Amino acid sequence: MHIRLATATDIPALHPVIEGAYRGDSARTGWTFESDILHGPPRTDPARLAAILNSPDDRLLIALEDDKPIGCVQITDCGGGTAYLGLLCIAPLRQAGGLGRQLIDAAEALARDDFATTTMEMTVIDRRTELISYYERRGYTLTGEARPFPIPFDPPLSMAVLAKALAANARLG
């Protein structure tokens, strides 16, 4: 697997990988699917991916195998030494082989190098206990903070906030 910054030419091939990892029947072959919890609009769209690429506060790393996208991760500079890790995905048939860990490591290194990040945070749907456990095994801890899910659902969903210190002198808040 090769990891690099995504470009606009990657979007047409990357978008279906993202949707396949999170939603629909193909996502069920992996363990990170959201289909049993979420219904409705796609996880993202090509315009949103282009906006990420054009934002000075965002980076999108793409994982490639034989020059074909198999995953990605977004890093957003939140300021104050904090970055946000999001949109982490690996194609369902490639999950559970350590590729997600490699993308997380690359995202953390990029956050430190590009944004001088000392704390990486993320949000996970609080019902996704297996996913929260995965991130805890990667050194992230639950902060006790919960944020509302960005799309209203009945019953409402909430997002658990996890954080990880990326430097010895960083504080989790």
Image: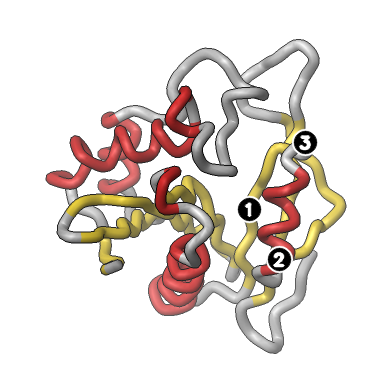
Q: Are marks 1 and 2 in contact (CB under 8 Å)?
A: yes
Q: Position of residue 114 (x, y in %)?
A: 39, 73
Please name the residue that numbered disc 2 is placed on: 140
Q: CA distance from mark 1 to mark 2?
A: 9 Å
Q: Which mark is residue 127?
A: 3
Residue type at the position of mark 2: Tyr
Give 134 or 142, whichever is nearer the viewer: 134
**Which residue is rendered at x = 17% and y = 60% of the image?**
66
Q: Is residue 104 above or below residue 171?
A: above
Q: Is residue 15 above or below residue 24?
A: below
Q: Are marks 1 and 3 in contact (CB under 8 Å)?
A: no
Give 34 or 4, whichever is nearer the viewer: 34
Q: Earlier in the sequence, mark 1 or mark 3?
A: 1
Q: Which mark is residue 59?
A: none
Give the side of residue 94 with respect to residue 153, left or right. left
Q: How many neighbours does mark 2 have within 10 angstroms: few (below 14), some (14-19), or many (20 or more)?
A: some
Q: Position of residue 15 (x, y in %)?
A: 30, 36
**Which residue is rendered at x = 48% and y = 53% of the image?**
95
Q: Secondary structure at mark 2?
A: loop
Q: Quadrant of residue 47?
A: top left
Residue type at the position of mark 3: Arg
Image quarter (top left, top right, bottom left or bottom right) of the C terminus: bottom right
**Which residue is rendered at x = 77% and y = 20% of the image?**
156
Please name the residue that numbered disc 1 is placed on: 122
Q: Position of residue 159 (x, y in %)?
A: 73, 38
**Which residue is rendered at x = 77% and y = 45% of the image?**
129
Q: CA distance from mark 2 to mark 3?
A: 17 Å
Q: Secondary structure at mark 1?
A: strand
Residue type at the position of mark 1: Met
